Image: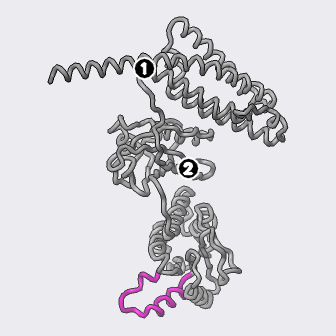
Amino acid sequence: MTMADDRVSMFISHKMATHKRAAARIKTILEARAERLDVYICEEIPAGDRWREWITNRLAHSQLLLVLLPHRATDLTWIADEIGRFESACPAGHLVILKSPSDPVPDIVRDRQIIDIGIDQLHERFLRPLYCQSTLTALEVPLNARVSDVDLQRDAGQIEEALLGDLRIESFGESLIIETVDLAVTTAQDLGNARVRAPNGCASILNWSLHTFSWNQLRARAEEEKGKGTFWVNEMEQVIIEVARQDRPRVMTSTFRGRGQVAGQIFRPQLERVDYINDIPVRFYFAFHEVLAPELVRGPGPIGDVFNLLYIATRVRWEVLNPFLDVSSTGGTLSSRLEMSEEAQRDVISRVRTSLRIIEAEAERHNMIEDGLNAFEDTDRALVLQLIQKRDWIRRAIEAAADRKNFLQLMAELTHGLTFNCEATEVLATKYLELVREDRQRVLRMLAQSSSNEAQLN
């Protein structure tokens, strides 16, 4: 085999109106992985050349024709012409056709095997056969058998972005993509050198124009203004570690205030998607959504601590107990719950467990129970300590019934929880009223002192 025979030529057939940038990007990606691969696009036609002859010549000497079907296009005349020329000149050549997953298969290629644009499809059905096998090239020696699956997955992702990027996509809010390829993530320190991409920049969340940076740089930037909130970075780390350990990631609750032009606006990150290679997570997608209120607003000291206990009790009452016991304000009963199908009962058990887990996670993160107990003294403290112990007993009983998938027992424990919740809320509300009255007196004294000072100055 001669050196000329050892090379592979590919022509990319596309509509310039929709895929001009994508074709150029794909050419760069493909040629970067193999020195023996030549990729041609019509945008390379030298000035003054006869463009029809140039295209015909390149088609005739190509072993591969990569067709980029435009999104929902109706006029495919020129692409159909190029397919026809290629098949006439290269009967042994291979045709690779890419289309958007949401688009129907056009009539001109209805009898062909089509590849839907997506990372897995591009990797398994196009890039791996192209470089690591001889399926598409018919070479004795593959173009690049040493290229790793990680690199091919990354290339597939970039090709997907290039093709879908030609669509008009309007996204709302900021987003960050954390790449952990080749990193063994077991602790937060392991993320230090992870590559972070910000497709739209970080103007809103960090007043930053960078599009690529390391995780350590992100953490350092967040810590420059700790007053705006930095726990969101810790929580993102914890979520990434949980996914890497194949645990269910927590529901993220942390919020922080934006910077720059959006100073004062409040954002909350959430994990939206994870890319895997061989069951190992390599890419994490986080979206930052604006929220109307910060994660936790309260007063300082005992008044804030008791308020938090009331807040937790209120959430349990109206997010869990009343809805799942089906108790209405007009005197509803449990009969409708007990008549549910087994599948519906299992769904209720799962939702109860999830709701309580979310509420408990928030209470633990802010140390609400212990801090709330410290707001009480003497006899009141002993009473609240008993309530906390009773709460823990009821919570464990609910979890045990859920673990056993015992629906009747779960309903019984929730009923006990409802009775307890009313008792605890009354105790907390009484203490909160006492603290509010004391606070009111302090405010009146402060205002009176302020008025007196002003009078003396005048």
Judge whether 108 appears above or below 433 on screen: below
Q: Which residue is mark 2?
A: 272
Question: Is residue 162 found left or right of 279 in the rendered image?
Answer: left
Q: Is residue 190 magenta?
A: no
| Residue 376 in picture, x, y percent from top left | 50, 12
Label 1 vs label 2: CA separation? 37 Å
Which kind of residue does numbered mark 1 sit on?
A: Gly
Q: Which residue is mark 1?
A: 301
Q: Secondary structure at mark 2?
A: strand
10 Å neighbourhood of mark 2: few (<14), some, or many (≥20)? few
Q: Which residue is located at x 67 percent, y 33 percent?
A: 320
Q: Is residue 44 magenta?
A: yes
Q: Which residue is located at x 35 percent, y 40 percent?
A: 220
Q: Quadrant of the C terminus?
A: top left
Q: Quadrant of the N terminus?
A: bottom right
| Residue 53 in picture, x, y percent from top left | 47, 93
Front position in the image: 183 or 4: 183
Q: Earlier in the sequence, mark 1 or mark 2?
A: 2
Front position in the image: 46 or 384: 384
| Residue 142 in picture, x, y percent from top left | 58, 69
Which kind of residue does numbered mark 2 sit on?
A: Glu
Judge whether 46 appears above or below 303 on screen: below
Q: Would you say the residues marked 1 and 2 are in contact, meaning their CB atoms lie under 8 Å apart?
A: no
Q: How is the image coloured?
A: one colour
Residue 409 seen in the figure? yes
10 Å neighbourhood of mark 1: few (<14), some, or many (≥20)? few
Q: Which residue is located at x 74 percent, y 38 percent?
A: 348
The image quadrant that residue 428 belongs to is top right
Residue 9 seen in the figure? no
Q: Which residues are magenta?
A: 40-62
Question: Is residue 383 found left or right of 262 in the rendered image?
Answer: right
Judge whether 22 appears above or below 63 on screen: above
